[in-house]
Image: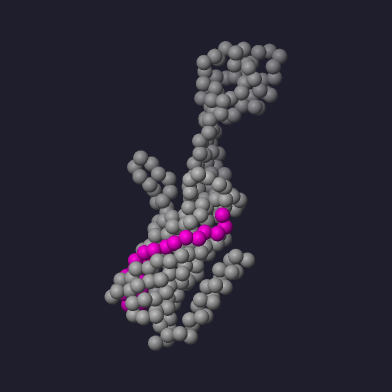
């Protein structure tokens, strides 16, 4: 229903000015420059597709409104680390490994790719070929794709064969079944939308340059909400630079 509502708003905007003068519309295509994992050398950027139909209504030679309906790809990366003390049920004393590090380390790195349908409502001021613009955008998530790598490392299990040290009378297989992996890396993929916020609302602002009917745009988008529904101390919102080209056909005088 939210997708239908967004489409209805966009169609009302277009139909409301369809008979007016100085209406321009046409295709727009580009990409989002999304900052992902950071390192000592700086942030890495991953592109996301952006494309759709752009609509402009020019009130004067200098002032106009922009809108449209777009499909746009947004991405997020996440990571977590956890340390667990391995429970040997008191057998660490019996098998004589006092002082050995019994901790198991788990590292998770993941990436979420979300496809939204987006409707911006932008006010722009034009001087000669240059324009500055700003306004809100409203986006609804259509699909999501998650990739996650999980690594488990238990140092003492890589160097000690616990099965050979278990005293007689104790089921070694049962004990080993309770232990984490000595060293393991797994990759999982899913299309689940669980824990992902469906609605993204924010602001976009930028500059553009028009030559003939072709316009080059660069803008920055900042989302107001966390992309996940889980409550956290740190805001993980969609924020990125966007580069695009649009070719508009004039309608009316």
Q: Choose between 234 and 207: the one closer to the eye.
A: 234
Residue 209 image-quadrant placement? bottom left
Query: Quadrant location of the C terminus?
Result: bottom left
Q: Is residue 3 above or below residue 113?
A: below
Q: Is residue 218 left or right of residue 105?
A: left
What x and y, as percent, mark residue 29?
A: 43, 67
Q: Is residue 31 left or right of residue 115?
A: left
In the rendered image, is residue 189 in sight?
A: no
Q: Give the image's coloring scheme.
A: one colour
Residue 64 image-quadrant placement? bottom left
For the point 52% across and 18% down, which residue is it? Answer: 100
Q: Is residue 184 above or below residue 49?
A: above
The residue most toward the front is 233
For the point 57% across and 12% down, which residue is it? Answer: 96
What x and y, as percent, mark residue 236?
A: 48, 49
Q: Choose between 62 and 152: the one closer to the eye.
A: 62
- Secondary structure that dominates the magenta span: strand
What x and y, as percent, mark residue 97?
A: 55, 15
In the rendered image, is residue 82 in sight?
A: yes
Which span of residues is magenta-colored?
A: 197-217
For the point 45% across and 75% down, which residue is it? Answer: 55
What x and y, as percent, mark residue 185?
A: 53, 36
Q: Is residue 23 above or below residue 148?
A: below
Residue 199 lies in the magenta stretch: yes
For the point 54% across and 75% down, which residue is it? Answer: 11
Query: Quadrant location of the N terminus?
Result: bottom right
């Amino acid at each position: 229903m939210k997708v239908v509502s967004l489409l209805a708003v966009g169609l009302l905007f277009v139909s409301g000015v369809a008979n007016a003068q100085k209406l321009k519309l046409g295709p727009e295509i580009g990409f989002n420059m999304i900052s992902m994992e950071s390192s000592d050398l700086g942030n890495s950027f991953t592109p996301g597709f952006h494309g759709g139909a752009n609509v402009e209504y020019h009130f004067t030679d200098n002032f106009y409104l922009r809108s449209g309906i777009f499909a746009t790809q947004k991405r997020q990366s996440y990571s977590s680390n956890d340390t667990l003390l391995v429970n040997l049920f008191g057998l660490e004393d019996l098998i004589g490994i006092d002082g050995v590090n019994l901790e198991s380390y788990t590292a998770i790195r993941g990436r979420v790719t979300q496809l939204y349908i987006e409707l911006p409502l932008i006010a722009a001021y034009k001087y000669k070929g240059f324009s500055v613009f700003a306004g809100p955008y409203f986006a609804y998530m259509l699909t999501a794709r998650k990739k996650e790598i999980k690594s488990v490392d238990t140092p003492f299990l890589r160097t000690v064969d616990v099965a050979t040290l278990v005293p007689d009378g104790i089921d070694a297989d049962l004990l080993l079944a309770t232990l984490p992996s000595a060293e393991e890396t797994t990759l999982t993929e899913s299309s689940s939308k669980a824990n992902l916020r469906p609605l993204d609302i924010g602001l976009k602002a930028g500059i553009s340059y028009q030559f003939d009917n072709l316009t080059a745009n660069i803008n920055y988008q900042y989302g107001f909400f966390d992309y996940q529904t889980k409550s956290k101390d740190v805001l993980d919102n969609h924020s990125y630079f966007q580069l695009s080209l649009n070719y508009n056909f004039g309608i009316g005088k």
